[in-house]
Amino acid sequence: MSTVTDEPTDLGERKGAGARPTGIKWRDLGQRYALLLAWALVIVAFGALRPDIYLSAANFQTIFASQAVLLLLALGLLLPLVTGNLDLSIASNLAFSSIFLAILQVKHNFSLPVAIAVVLVGGLVIGMINGYLIVGLGIDSLIATLGIGTVLQGLALAISNGETYSGISSTLINLAANYRFAGISLGFWYGVILTLLLTYLFSFTALGRRMLFVGRNAEVSRLSGVRVARIQWGAIVGAALIASLAGVLYTGTQGAADPTSGLEFLLPAFAACFLGSTTVQPGRFNPLGTFIAVFFLVSGITGLQILGAESYVQQLFYGIALVLAVALAKLPERRRRRRRAAV
Amino acid sequence: MGVPVRQTDVETTNIALRGITKSFVGVQVLKGVDLSISHGEIHGLLGQNGSGKSTLIKVLSGTHDPDDGEVLVEGKPQGLPLVDFARVGFSFVHQDLGLIEELTVLDNFLLPHTARSSSWYLRWRDDRARVQRVLDDYGVHIDVRAAVASLEATDRALLAIVRAVHDIRQSETRGLLVLDEPTVFLPREGVERLFDLVRGVAAQGTSVLFVSHDIDEVRELTSRVTVLRDGAVAGTAVTGDVTDDELVTMIVGRRLAKHQGRLRAHDGLGEVVLKAMNVHTSLLAGVDVEVREGEVLGVTGLNGSGFEHVPYALFGALSDARGEIATSGGRFDLGSFGPGGALANGMAFVPGDRKREGAAADLTLADNVTMQAIDRHRPWLLRRDALRREAVRLIGDYDVRPGDPDAVYGSLSGGNQQKALMAKWLTTEPSLLLLHEPTQGVDVGAREQIFKALDDVRDRRTAVICASSDCEQLARICDRVVVVARGRVAAVLTGESLDKDTLIEQVYNTATILDERDEHKETSA
């Protein structure tokens, strides 16, 4: 029999099978909420250092409101990540959409709804192109979206001549930043809504389950009758649409647009997604985890800024967070491997 | 074959293995294997899957450290494990050839050299001319600048062999070339060219160990042959002196009590569930298959005969498959059928490679067993508790252990992985279940449970098609077995003729029968 040579661990695994303890798994629980705990620690630490400023309601309103754009972008990025692709063009897409909206509004006098509609159609087209390159032609998503992202940066400079556009519709500014609900700008609440929508998608729909399978093993999905190409394509288009929407929101929160700002969101978005995958549902990209990760990152950076840290600290913080998140995400797998090796 | 053979002539013996023994987790896989190969001899190694062939080769390549025994090269004992196999002139060509398709012939040729070289300056121009010359010398006329992906299958195999031989020439010995089923995916004329090359290599004094399933090929190429059975040498013989029957007997072994196939009344079979006509794939050359309600149909053959393609092709999983199938849902063209179409026609498919094709190994057991079941739930508002209850029920019904729905699928044992896959697919209540090597890497206990599950499936009037190289298993579970050879149906066994030994004989003999048949056709035409 080839049994023995194929999988020598077979016998040992079986013996260990019944021995697994039931009840609450403290280690799992600890891992699941470690990030939430870290967030709380960050708040406590900075609160202790500068209680007057850090613990004020205004500060928390700022923390929640300031990163609504990042939250939207990171949530959009979840879609391709879950289905096994990367999208490096999201931040360029955001910057392009932002300046595109401003130009349509300010230079060409488009009404706000029409301008937003045109920008979203633009996002749709970008997503279709990415989808065609990745799914249709089979180009590695890293390369395809790196290329398209760079093209978008060029386009943003071309259509704007490198100029900054101000004079954005006050309606948009109000809807993005000025109007508040429960003391926090509406922009934040859009992020909350999208978080809930994606949680619903991933956890309570058959489509979400299929997306998960496509990302984890495309061949298994194909052999299980899942239309892999269509799902990957949809996820890529979804990310592009959400990135455009984030661009619209960005223009609203800034009240102006220039062709390069917004590009710096790329790394934090990835950091948030990967950091988020270590919490709530460890080992899986998930919207709630991403939500927590975004505000963990912002709370830390805001605290450092209040303490008077230089602006480069932000980059250190995001960079370290990304690498740390990926390293942490590997932990359960390594632990499992060690356990197998020990048997 | 022109090579003089003296049984244990010390003068000419190049490589000698003595009493090689190896166990894994208490199971002896090699039981004192002796093997000697002379200079310039092509030696055949035959044996069924699991007879210990691959373990023996892995001893030669230093992957396994034998528990006992010794390896002598030109009379000198070697240190074990043989990590330094390249230095003593051992070189291997495996079925997958070990070529990197995207790189050029030159890159691939120099790969073993590059791996060892510490040079900071590579002389590309010199190397190119040199490698081209080496290939030309061996009569392999391919451009060294071509990408390996653009080569014919035969040329790739030849390239791999010349590379291996060239490697041997770098050592001080005349060496040993091990060919591990290199012909499996080659067309007939390619096999001839490969054999010519191998004969040329042997003529220079290199020993060749030719591992194969195919008795005809061993007969054509080798001067002596050793047969492994259950980890021991069943016999070594001068190839010209043994008959096919004697070889098959050595391979299979004669047990006193024949393992009796289940004799089933065929009046229990119902309507035709699926009829496939003229199925073509890269390996299949026109196969017809028909299966009825409540019937278990086996498909078997040698490695490379194309038998494994049958379930994949019927499920629409091979994009290059051609042919037509008819189900209760209508007639379909296999090229455009697709797994979605198969599913819609009540088919289910449990592939052999569980971690790559069967399940997402890093998701949980619950995720995997309910993958198909979610279709029965409201797709836009899944009840997670209901889904979980279903997972727990399936895990219990199919006795998957550990019974923890949150266990990571990949951490389960082979048998439990397979039970989980059966659970995943059988919840779709298929009218046709396709299986590929359902008990590969599965322990004995789980194997019985899988057979039990198949009995239940049959009682529910589901048709089953099981592609497997495990003849014992097929004899046990099947009502009818189709033997595929060289892409065509070579034999069909039913009823009393369906037992393990007959099946193995058919598998090893049908290739010969087909050849004769082809020759008759040619002469009569």
Image: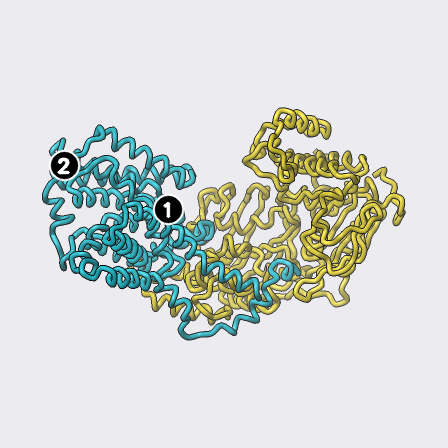
Chain colours: A cyan, B yellow
Residue B183 x %, y %: 67, 42
Position of B191 with respect to B342 (left or right) is right
Residue under circle 1?
Answer: A232
Residue type, numbered disc 2: Ser
Position of B318 with respect to B164 (left or right) is left
Position of B130 with respect to B233 (left or right) is left
Q: Is residue B294 above or below residue B93?
A: below
Give the position of the C terminus of chain A as an image quadrant.
bottom right
Give the position of the N terminus of chain A as an image quadrant.
bottom right
Q: Residue at x 64, y 62 (%)?
A: A4
Q: Earlier in the sequence, mark 2 or mark 1?
A: 2
Graded by Cα atoms within 10 Å as few (under 14), some (14 to 19) or many (20 or more), the crowding at tag 1 reads: many
Front position in the image: A205 or A23: A23
Residue type, numbered disc 1: Gln
Front position in the image: B45 or A113: A113
Residue under circle 2?
Answer: A166
Residue A307 x %, y %: 25, 54
Protein chain holding label 1: A
Q: Are marks 2 and 1 on the same chain?
A: yes
Graded by Cα atoms within 10 Å as few (under 14), some (14 to 19) or many (20 or more), the crowding at tag 2 reads: some
Q: Is residue A9 above or below residue A275?
A: below
Front position in the image: B286 or A301: A301
Q: Is residue B12 above or below residue B396?
A: above
Residue at the outermost left position: A170
SS class of the residue under badge 1?
helix
Protein chain holding label 2: A
Residue A252 x %, y %: 16, 44
Q: Residue at x 63, y 46 (%)?
A: B304
Q: Is residue B378 among the parts visible in the rendering?
A: no
